[in-house]
Amino acid sequence: MTRRTRWDRLQSQYHLIRDSLEGEDAIKDQGQLYVPKPEGMSAQNYAHYLDRGCFYGAPEMTLRALVGLALRKDPVVSLPPRIEPMRLNATNEAAPMSILIEDAVREVMSMGRFGILLDFPAEGNTANTVPHLSTFKAETIEDFDTGFVDGKKMLTRVHLASDQDFEGADVIYELILEDTIYKFRRFIRDQHKNRVDVGDEIIPTVNGRALDFIPFVMVSHEGLRPEHVTPPFLSLCQVALSHFKNSCDREHAIYLTASPTPWVAGSISADKVPTQIGAGAIWTLPEGTEVGMLEFQGAGVAAQKELMGEKIDTMATLGARMLSVTMNRNETIDTATQRTRSELALLHGVVVSVETALNRLLRLAAEWVGDNPDEAAVTLSRDFIESSMEPKMIEQQMKLYLSGIISRATLHENLQKGEIVRADRSWEDEKDMIEEDGGDISAIIGTRDE
């Protein structure tokens, strides 16, 4: 498969997923792209045929539920002082870090690709300027190359669609590594699809030095490797579209056959042909004329209904069943957690990849401004089901502490894991709050803390 063919196929898949997530109106707006017009059907009848269909919104419901599970607990974000402003202003669109994390999880979960570029503002930089993150959706990452630099495989070229235009043509960004120097270029394609560079070449620098790598990561549910991956929601959206086609066919069949239709057989003059039907309408027909009603009989519509039911079950298998991840009545927390992790392998992969990508870029941002990169960290929870610690377990934890087997700090960590104490509150912060409330945090006799 050629590079261009692969790209065209990916674009088609991305558009299908976007439209499926947007819902019924977006699918219908595409007309024959998704639902071909039956042979012989007029344009007007096709419009009615398409309008009668009902799109089953399993993709959007599934994605909303999975993102909710991934962010059930608020991410813990730690930033050193110089890049602390990124907490509330992380992206080139002034979005806070919390929104960036949610967008990244949603995009990687559904599309399988999300691009993030670490950059400084193009103009007005000062000693106090903070880097920002520019984000790129899957369909805007038009092309890329990789190569080995000092024995490491890394990006050597990336083409990104932008929202800028030049003389009516769309501007494409090129991030390129030439002679181990990172350079930024812009170009358009003319009417013959030939490349035309616009603007000046830029060599971004940090502290007066050019970069020897491209500060761009491509995040997927399979990691940070710059490779083509199959969008996770593709299969679910394809089944949802197939279900919609069946819905159009079934609704059309019911429309044509459900209402009883009268028939008249005999020699009838033009002025005697019935023009009305129903209560109050009287037909005066010649002697010998036969009258009856046509009604649908057969299993065709029922078979369509059964087929649609099968596809709903398939959608449930592909993802919608995750909408109600709960513990069984006779199931322990550990068993439920293990079962859920196996069911939510995709979700776990997305969370790990997004967390890794943001940590890499935030630590790099801290280095750029001279801060401690070890102080920059984003932690996303892996607890996708509620696992609040039961009263008996809390009692056991207290006994371990009072027996001197665990420290008070370890007790605090265990209570965090059991969702009794907030995950983003350290033991030191908890002690300060206890003191402010007038509580006693002195060591208990017989424990290690003494």
Image (cartoon, rainbow, N blue to C red):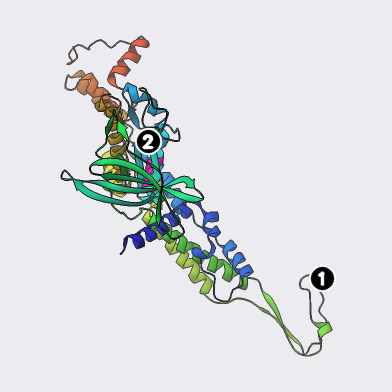
Which region is colored magenta? Answer: 103-108
Q: Which residue corresponds to the image point at 46% horizontal and 61% vertical from the top-left?
A: 241
Screen quadrant of the C terminus: top left
Report which residue position mark 2 lands on. Answer: 133
Which amino acid type corresponds to the residue marked 2 in the rendered image? Answer: Leu
Which amino acid type corresponds to the residue marked 1 in the rendered image? Answer: Gly
Residue 408 screen position, x and y as percent: 23, 19
Callout 1 environment at 10 Å: few (<14), some (14 to 19), or many (20+)? few
Q: Main secondary structure of the magenta part?
A: helix
Q: Verify whether residue 105 appears in magenta.
A: yes
Q: Is residue 256 above or below residue 154?
A: below
For the residue pair 154 and 376, the one nearer the viewer reads as 154
Callout 2 environment at 10 Å: few (<14), some (14 to 19), or many (20+)? many
Label 1: element kind: loop
Report which residue position mark 1 lands on. Answer: 280
Screen quadrant of the N terminus: bottom left
For the residue pair 348 and 83, the one nearer the viewer reads as 83
For the residue pair 165 and 409, the one nearer the viewer reads as 165
Q: Earlier in the sequence, mark 2 or mark 1?
A: 2
Residue 161 screen position, x and y as percent: 41, 48
Label 2: element kind: strand
Q: Is residue 94 above or below residue 256?
A: above
